Image (spheres, helix red, strand yellow):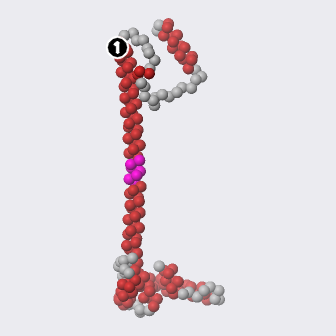
Amino acid sequence: MPAAVRQLVTDVISGSRGTDRIDVSEAPIDPELLPVRTYADEAHRRKALGLARAREKAWAKDHKQREQERARKRESTKQESTKQESTKQNQLRSFDEKARPRRRAEAEEAAPGLLARAGLPPGKNELEIATRLLMRHEEVTPEKVQQAIAGFEAIHEAHVRSFRETGGQTSWPSATSLIEKLF
């Protein structure tokens, strides 16, 4: 190694000790802003400029790929949130459709027939329970009505038992409040 190059390398190394290095790999390199160097011949100069251009192209390509990746992530996030929102809306819509398949008048007309098929007497509470079931569900089987009325009776008996055990400290169970609890 020539003595001048050795001295230059030694000066550069000793001068860089204790100083913080700055990462310039993110910034593009403009060959015209590079310090003027003297090259042994024209071929070396062209090679250095070609390398500088290649580094700049690589940096630009890498930067473009990172931007495309960020855009893809943003797009996929947006699509995912749109998909979740549409799923929620579909669930709410299907819930609303199931919750109101019949109007109250239609359900009140169909309730006595449903109770007759279930083999139950058409009492006031039974008619109200059958009406609510018909309003809530599209198809109501006689077994479902029997289960609902059995559940109502069990709740009513439990409240009456609680009233008697407390010596009248709790309120007497009203049928409408118990039907509300049932539905």
Of residue 172 and residue 149, the one placed in the foreground of this image is 172
Residue drawn at x 44%, y 20% is: 34
Identified at 41% across, 85% down, the residue is: 130
Residue 24 is one of the magenta-drawn residues: no
Identify the residue shown where x is 37% and y is 80%.
102
Span colored in magenta:
74-80
Residue 140 lies in what quarter of the image? bottom left
Res. 162 image quadrant: bottom right
Q: Amino acid at mark 1?
A: Ala
Q: Position of residue 115 (x, y in %)?
A: 38, 88
Whether residue 157 is visible: no
Which residue position holds label 1?
43
Image coords of residue 132 (percent x, y): 42, 82
Report helix, strand or loop for mark 1: helix
What secondary structure characterizes most of the magenta part? Answer: helix
Image coords of residue 181 (percent x, y): 51, 80
> Is 70 drawn above or below residue 99 in the view shown?
above
Q: Quadrant of residue 29?
A: top left
Residue 41 pos. (x, y %): 37, 10
Q: Is residue 95 above or below residue 181?
A: above
